[in-house]
Each structure stands twice: as C-alpha cells, then as structure tokens.
Image (cartoon, helix red, strand yellow):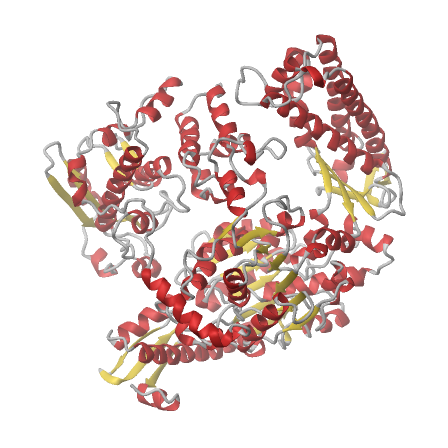
Amino acid sequence: MKTSKLNQVNSEILEIGAVKIDKEKNISIFETFVKNNHKVSAEIFSCCKNFTQDDLDKAPTLNQIKKDFLDFIKDKTIICHNKKFKEACLNYNIGKIDNKFIDSRELACILEPFHSEFNLDYLKKKITTNTNDQKHRALSDVVDNIDIVNALILRFRDRLEKEDKLTLYPLTFEIDSYLNKYSLENWEWSEFINNADYNLSEKTKTVYQSEKKPNKKENLKEQEVFKLLGNYKSHYEELLKEDDIWASKKGFIYEFRQGQYEMTKLIRETFNKNVNNIACIEAPTGIGKSVGYLLPAVLEARYAKKRIIVSTATKELQVQLIHKDLPNIINSLGLSGKVSYGYIKGKNNYICKSKFYEYKKDYNPEDKTYSDILSIIIIENLIKDGIYGDIEEISYWLLENFPELQNHINRVVCDVDLCKPKKCFENCLYKKRVEELKEEDITVVNHSLLARWPYMDEKPIENIIVDEAHNLVEKGYDFFSEEIEYNSLRYFLKEIYPSEFSSSSKYYKDIKDKQKRKIKPIDRFYSEIKLDRSIKQKISHHINFIFEKMNEVLKFGLNEGYSSITNYDLNWEINLQQDDEVGNLYKNNEYIKITYKSYTQIIKSNFKNILSNIKQILVLFDRNMDDDLIDKESDIYKYGKSKIKDLEDISITLGKFLEDDKGDLIARIVTISSNYNNFNLKVVPLNLSDLFRENILSSLNCGIFVSATLSVDNNMDYFINTLGINKVKNTKKIIEPIYNYKKRVEVIRVTDIGGYKGEDFIPNMADNISQYVELSDSNVLSLFNSRKRLEDTYNLLEKNLSDKDINVYMNKNGIKSLKNAKDKSIVLGSKGCFEGVDVPGDGLVFVTLDKLPNLKPTDPLYFSIMTKFNKTYFDVNYPQMVIKVKQALGRLLRSKYDYGVFVLFNMGNNVYNNKKLEKNLHGCIIKDANRNNIQKYIYYHLKRSRKEVITTLIIDILKNKNRKQDNLDLVEYINHEIKKRSIKGSVKYYQNKKNKLLVEYFNIKYIVDIEKICKNYNDRF
C-alpha cells in the first residue's frame, strides 16, 4: 500500500497492490489507485515513480474498490513488509479484516538479524540481484517483497546445508522446538519455509553469501601506483595530485585541495621523524581530513610495516572510516586484501557466546511471550557464526520492534573480568577481533578505549592518529575517573547475595528480575569454596545494611525538602561545595536557606558505614577461603574471584571518595537524580595532562592529533596544555578553510526573543524555528544546551505543526531525515548532535543554537579546576565555548555545494566575549536581527548562495562529463548528478535547444549557455 502519511489514523490509502498465489500456483494480481479526500504532499509524488495527482483524480474511491479488494484476498494469509502499520491501516480504513497477517520484516529479523536496516529498499539491494532504486509503488513493492522473501528462505536453507544441518527434520525445527519449550506455537513463518518449492530456486533473484574472489585488476592497479611511488616514495602526498587514482569512483568529482596536501605532508614527515614525533593539526571542514590522514596510514602500513591505531570520538565516524573511507582509499591504491583493517571496542560492547548459551539454557520467564522468545532466537542467529556480536551494530529497528531484546543483550555482554579470549573455546566476534589485532595493520577505536588500552600484548600503542581530537579535552576527565552508581551497585550486591537468605530480605525483593533462575552462579561459588552457612548469613546481614544505608541517602532528599526546592538533579563537589546554596525552602511561615551541607554529612556518614561493611565482607572471604583446596582453573571459581575483585575495586573507589583533602588534585562529585531514585559518586583526577602524558604520549613513536576545531583565538594552547602535549616536542599546524565561510554562511543573533530564562523564550524560539523551515524550504537542525529546553520546544513544535507537512524529531534518531532534501524536517538535538552530523547540499541549510554553550560556574568539575588550579571562570569556560560553537557552525559547511544560515537565539550581554567569539568563526560577521528584518537577511543570503551553488555544480558536472566522455543524454546526466548531491535543482533544454539549459532551483530560473561555459573553462566537447 501507498499512504499519504505514516500514521494509520491520519493517513489515506492512495494505492493498493497485491499478488495472490493459490495452491495450484496460479497467480493473480490486484492493483488500483484510490481517490484522495485530502491534499497529498508534493513529497509523495516526488518519491513515488510515475505517480501523479491526475492518477488519483481519475481513481475510484475507497468504498468503490473495497468489495473487489476483499473478494480478492478472501481468507488468504497476507504477507507484507511492516505488518503492524499495514494491518492497522487496512483495519482503520476498510474495516476489520480477519485474515492472518505475517511480516516479511520479521522473517528478515529472525533469519538474518545482522543487517543494519530492514526496509524494503535496503534488503532488496543486499540479498537480491535487483539493485535498482525502490519505485515506492504498491505493486512494484509487492514484487520486491516476493524477491526478498524468496531470497531469505533460500539463503537460510543454503546456510543450513553449509553447516551440514539439512536433516529429515523440518528446516525450522530448532526455532520451533525452542518456542514449543515455552508452550508457544510454531513460528508463523515455519509452514512457508518448510513447504517451499526449492526446485524453483534458479528462477529467483537470490544473492547467496559467498567469499570475495581475488581481483586481478587490483594487483595491476597496485603496480601502477607503485610505479608512481617510485618518484614519490619519500613524498607520497604527491599522489593527491594524481586525479586518475582518486577519480575512479563512479560519479565522484575529485579536486586537489592544497590544505589536504599540506596535512598529508606533515603526517608523512611526523611518521618518518623528519620533524617532532607529535603533530597537532587543525583541518577545517571540507578539507578531506579522513583521506588526508588515512593515505599516510595505508601507505605506512603497506610499505613501512607500521601498525597504526586510529581513534575517533563518534560512532558515526568509526562506521564511515571502516565501511567507506578505508576501503575506498585501499581500493583506489589497488591494495585490496593487502592492508588489513578493522575496529575494536571494550569487552562490554560484545555479546559473549558462552554467557548467552548458559543464559538461554536457564531462561525461565514468568510471562512467556512470542516476542520475548523470538528475541533470544535473534541473538542466537546473530552470534552463532562468530562474525557478528557488536552490540552497537544491532539495528535500532530490531531493538524498537522486539522490546525484550535489549534486556536479553544486557544479560549476555562480555564480562570485563571473566572474559579471557586466549582461553575461550567459542568462536565469538570479540575473540576473533582480539586475535586479528596481532597482525592487523590499521585498527579503528574510540577515545575512551584508547585512554585505557587493554590490548598492549596484541597491539602496543606506538603509532596513533586521533581524529575529533578536541573531544579529548572535555571527555579526558571521564576516561580516568572512577564512579559508583546506585542501580549498578544494587544489582551487583544482589548478584553476590546468598540465595538461601534472599526470602528474608525486603531489599533483595525490591530488585525486580523477570527471569526465575534455578541457581545463581555465586551460590555455586560459595559451595565450591565450602563457605559455612553462618558465614553466608553474615554476608547477607552486611549487604542488607548496605542496602539500608543507600536507601537512606536517597530518602534524605525527599524527607528534608530538597525535592521541593528544585526539579533538577543535585550535583556538587562534596568537600568544596557543601556550603553552596541549593535554594530556599518555605517552612513554618518563613524561607530557610538550604545548602548541600546536611546532605553532605549524611552521605559521608552513611558511606563510611557502607565502606566498613564492604571491608568486613572482604575479610570474611579472605579468612574462609582455602585456596590450596580449590580448583583455581574452574569457571565458577574464576567467576567468584572476579566478583571479589569487583568488591575490592568498589572499596578502593569509596575510600578515595571519602578522603577529605581539599588540596589534592581530585574532584569528588555527588549527583542525586531529580526523582531521588538514583545517585552517582564520582572520583575525578584533575591532573589530566600528567595522566595523558603517562598513559598515551610516553609510549608513542608517532602521534597525530587532528580536528576541525583545535584552536581558540588562532592558537592551540588550550588543547596542548590540557593534555600535556606542551611538555613533549610537538608540531602545530592550522590549515586555512578552503570554503569562504563569510560568503556562504550567514550568522545571525536574534535580538528580540528574550532571555533564555524568560517564559516567552521557548515559545518565541519554537515560532522562529517553524518560520525557518518555511523560509528555507528545507530542513532545520536545532541544537540545545539544555535537555529540558529541548523537550519543551519539541512538545510545542509537535503541537503547532501537527497539521503541516513538517516532521519533528528529537536527537540523532531524526538525522537520517535531514539527508532527504525533499522533505521538511526539524531535528532537535543536544550535545551529541554538535558533531558527527554530516548532511550534504540542500538537506541542511539552517542550524540554530538556543544559547551560547557556557559552563555553569557551579559545575562541580570545573569549579574544582578553578579552585585547585587558581583559574578564572573565563579561563575555563571561554575555550570550550568557542570550540562548541565552531562545531555547531561546522554542521553547515561540509562540501563545496553547501551553504546556510546559523542562528544564535541567546548570546548574553558580554560584548567583549561575543566579539572575541566572532573572530573564531572563520571571518563570519554576527549580524543582529529581529523578527521584522530577519526574513530579509535570510531571503537575500539564500538567494545569493543558491545561485552560486547551482552554477558551480553545473560547471563541475559539465567538466566531469566531458572528462568521462559519457554517452548519456546531457540533461539526464546533469539531473542524475544533481540529485546525487542532495541538491533540489533540475535542468531541461531551453526551448529544445541543445546548447542552452533552463535551470530551475528553488525560486531561481535562468538560462545557461553550454558553449560559453565550456569556453570559459577551456573544456570544449
């Protein structure tokens, strides 16, 4: 079905397509347009191929086709993609349909859960030979779905055959048996899989999973590149001038960029120690920094045998490097299969196969549901071959549609202490990745893992390239901190609680656990070490006491009125800020000033008691374990010892937290949640420069630190001083932007929106954001420093725009919508969206920022830094504020064809700071505007920018077409290339003259003389 919207209540059915197959394999087709009653958005017609309003005007009404449709489907099982929506939509618009619906998306989820997406277009291109774009028409989607279902079933049978699992039992025997174990019926797809006619397999469009064959052309390509390297071996940045190497990708326009060349040259010199072995490089957006550092990485790995670690801050960039940038560079150089690469994360990012099979065997839920058991089958099918198992790569759609899946995953992650890949017999992904590290040339990691690198034996930290390096400053404190969180500690204590005394503990019962477990691992450990019942009873008493004292800490905030003073989390440094005011409490007809002092006292008192009880538990273990009589190699012993080690670590962290030394370089931070159901105690070392130098810099042969935002006021002092790079020999380079920010980006401060604490601020901001969508005829990314402001603005926009064709999203879930230049979307994002959002062309031309990202002067971490290092608020706040604003501004200009408007809603009244900030915005002038004149600024800027963008793009396309000598029709070729760059323009021949083009782009229409363009660029064809 094609519908006007994605909500079954608000949408109309516009088209229905169906294919019916009976038992005799007779095929019949149903296809019809449906006349609409409400306006259909232009996006629907642009998305659906050969679909116009005229088709709908001539179509029958829903009532007119209803009987024919019901007669056609009769009592047949209905297979559809996205059953939930289709079934609900039919039931709402046509009336209750009693047919059985089954979902082809569920089939894909169960049989092949490793896919990143499960939409029709993705699956069709992945597992069938049909790689054409989805037509988004009802019947063509049905045909695509038939191809997908056939492919999924055939690929499933092929896998079973390769695993030698084809037996007399039905193909879905294992799946059905597991469902039957819980008294659930067979999987609804089973009869189709088991009764399929596999003799027809040759007639399908199935792509089978197979190994890639060596490509002889790649060997020839490397020889050609190697010949070029003969001249450039010691100066391989010169390869960037060789267009033929980089322009081999279809539709890719390569341009030599001087800044990229300079960056690669400095990295090459740093690798070969022609300069200092540490280099810090600011490479602005559009410079092509990933190619700039990956080219040296690939060539140093291939020809100098250097093993390199590339570290990034965001998951998006890791995915881009692994799945796009590295393979593209390696293939362009003809080095496919000759330079190995991969990425690795910390243990707790992977599913443990041993843990999973133990969990599956013992799983005994109270409420047995179809979705719950299928979730376990999904995990098993995901991990069984040892190729998949990275938790972050599990599709968001899977987690959304199988709500129990996340809980199962949480129970089977690799245990940081127990998981020993060298001694494990399972072929899991984590073990595979650790083994591959030993020989891997280039490994991509995140910053947090790099700071705590646990794989020194497999791959020492010798050569690193750190992208998004500015994040090391803000997140560096987290890398080296320790914390104790209430819920985590509760569940840990439950894990070590002796089960035989659990029924008498009210605190133990408070911790909900859906699963009934037969016997806990800790009980097996207690049995293994022959722990006396009286000792276990003492352990249970100590744990109950700890539970009680933890609960008292949370109840104190409710009982003493803190919850009446503020709706926000309480957050303070326990030694330095205990006298700070929280607010005023009205009590006994007067206002009483409330500080953190009484809360600090209860926390210190209770946690001293908690620490004492933890130490007593550790003493009980120490005195009652005879290691000489225990099998230390048994799994259960290792499990128990790991739990004791965890308890020791908690004891050490609590000890550090309770130290009352205001002069040491440690911040001790308490956070109490606003609803008083959680706390977090954090121990943060403040000597970041020493820690980073000791843990990272000291071991390096070569270190490259790259970011688009390393400098503040045209120097890198803030970055290098914070990380201790100033104490080692280093080279710094700031590369000039290649785009004219001043010309392409309009920066506007709204002067009449009010202060951010005012009641009108959020309504005014929401009203402005709505106008920007209409003014730009494009998408808007609105960035926020406050989660509450974000949510309030979202709720207001949702309400105000409910009857308009404008989609509103929160956070990164909506980023994909920005890449669709045809839609109108507003995405509201918090800190995570200040970077890692890379949207080309007309997809994103408006970015707004609620206020300058200033630190709270009372923020416990930065207050501690100011106090203990004798720094001013300006010293601490200004550099990070500038970097975040530059990051936000950088969302707009990512490529040659980008432009836009950057709106700052609240900049405060500090004229000096604002002027200094302006000097950091690549030449952009901050213009003041109000609601009366802002439209004029926006209109003229967009008109000027768009004319420049479309002109430049058409020139580039014409030049590229001439160079490729493409035989496509000129207009067809240009429109194809324009669309690929997410530009909403189009061309056609002017008055059927082949030498002139009529360009239409937003509100711009003008004529292009092809011969004149070619002559001006000396590029005749």
- For the point 86% across and 36% down, which residue is it? 589
Q: Position of residue 379 (x, y in %)?
A: 44, 33
Locate residue 188: give its quadrant: top left
Q: Is residue 511 visible?
A: no
Q: Where 524 sits versus 966, above or below? A: above
Q: Position of residue 675 (x, y in %)?
A: 68, 35
Q: In the picture, which quadrant includes the C terminus? A: bottom left
Query: In the depicted view, which residue is nearer to us: 833 or 17?
Result: 833
Query: In the depicted view, which residue is nearer to us: 515 or 910?
Result: 515
Q: Position of residue 563 (x, y in %)?
A: 74, 36
Q: Position of residue 652 (x, y in %)?
A: 78, 34
Q: Where 757 sits versus 111, above or below? A: below
Query: In the depicted view, which residue is nearer to us: 893 or 301?
Result: 301
Q: Where 565 sits versus 527, above or below? A: below
Which residue is at the far top? Answer: 533
Query: In the depicted view, which residue is nearer to us: 306 or 995?
Result: 306
Q: Is residue 398 left or right of residue 54?
A: right
- For the point 24% across and 23% down, which residue is it? 168
Locate residue 27: give its quadrant: top left
